[in-house]
Image (cartoon, rainbow, N blue to C red):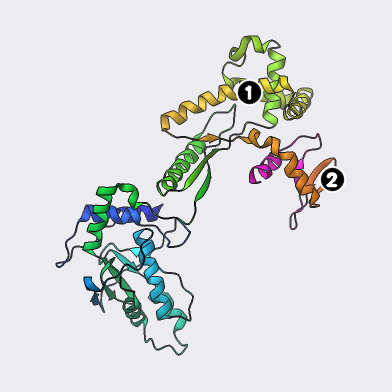
Amino acid sequence: MRALAAAATAVAAPTPTRLRLPLLSRTLRSGHCRSSYSSRLLRFSCSATTMGDETSTSVAPQEQESTVQAGSVKQQLSGLVLMSLRATVPEVEVEPMVEVSAKFADYQCNNAMGLWSKVKGSGTSFKNPNAIGQAIAKNLPSSDIIESTSVAGPGFVNIVLSNRWVAQRIQDMLVNGIKTWAPILPVKRAVIDFSSPNIAKEMHVGHLRSTIIGDTLARMFEFSNVDVLRRNHVGDWGTQFGMLIEYLFEKFPNWQEIGSQAIGDLQIFYKASKHRFDNDPEFKARAQQGVVRLQGGEERYREAWKKICDISRSEFDLVYKRLNVVLEEKGESFYNPYIPQVLEELSSKGLIKESEGARVIFIQGHQIPLIVVKSDGGFNYASTDLAALW
């Protein structure tokens, strides 16, 4: 995220021969600046900028050819730099290091010093990092993106964007819309699991953090024409529901007639049932068996479970509506029907073993096995997560 912030705030210094459009140029660069030319989306690298030993080269407009058309500005420049690196040091496998420049140009390639440390003493013809930088600049393929390059200090290659190219990009955006600036990503579909509160419990700051970060990532991917699955993996299954349902049955035998009033404040109801669960062994045993009956599909338990979920979900929706966040709920219960077939497939591969009444998976290097079916026959988080992964 810092890389995006750096791209949004960096302002190139004016030069006498170049018409600068600070706001539009900055917007263009921030809109297309991503921290890696490859599939890694967010990475931040620090690089120094040094004056001295500076030489410049200009690319004549009539000689320019559009070598790399797809992707962000940084992606396209990184593609050009990669071709130059392969021509400059074909014997070394290296990744382009292209960053926004805040002082001397629009972008800067910082590969020279790292390459020098790899090739010095190996009979190379290069005398110092600056010589490598000069070669990188010279070997850059002609492109309508680049106006000029210069090499400073120990091989920092400064890259100035073409005024003509910047103007054309801005014109395309004004005519065709901001979506024309969307980065081209190597992924077509993304699953983003975020927010994911627990039913019958209050949302806390951790859920808020996850909701905001998840929605931000989802919007970025959607802007980039990626099919995003906004998954809300709510905790709507498990031991707490046996506890809540048995407490409801005990306190309000006619709960179906009373409806939501039987539960009232769900937080208070939860705390009261939890206190009973922790201090009454007989109630705890009933609650644990209640989970098995719920998972087995017993209608009375399913109805009570649905009522509790509906009350909790309505409270969550108020928060999401206020934040203007859209999610598709696929809670733990959604995966329950798939658990048996997933476990059967794992059993057929000889991965599931019996151990002290439970069914477990022994994993090499771990003393404690992964329990996938508890000794009382119930499923747990591991069984749900395995089905979700499947």
> Where is 188 relative to 143, above or below?
above
261 sits left or right of 346 in the view:
left
- What amino acid type is highlighted by mark number 2? Glu
**Which dot marks residue 354?**
2
Furthest-left residue in this view: 16
Residue 333 coordinates in the image, percent (x, y): 65, 33
Give the residues in magenta.
361-390
Residue sitting at 76 percent across and 34 percent down?
378
> Where is 100 relative to 390, above or below?
below
**Which dot marks residue 149?**
none
Q: Are marks 2 and 1 in contact (CB under 8 Å)?
A: no
Residue 383 lies in the magenta-colored region = yes
74 sits left or right of 295 in the view:
left
Is label 1 in a helix, a strand or a loop?
helix
Residue 91 coordinates in the image, percent (x, y): 48, 81
**Which dot marks residue 306?**
1
Observer able to see residue 246: no
Residue 350 lies in the magenta-colored region = no
- What amino acid type is highlighted by mark number 1? Lys
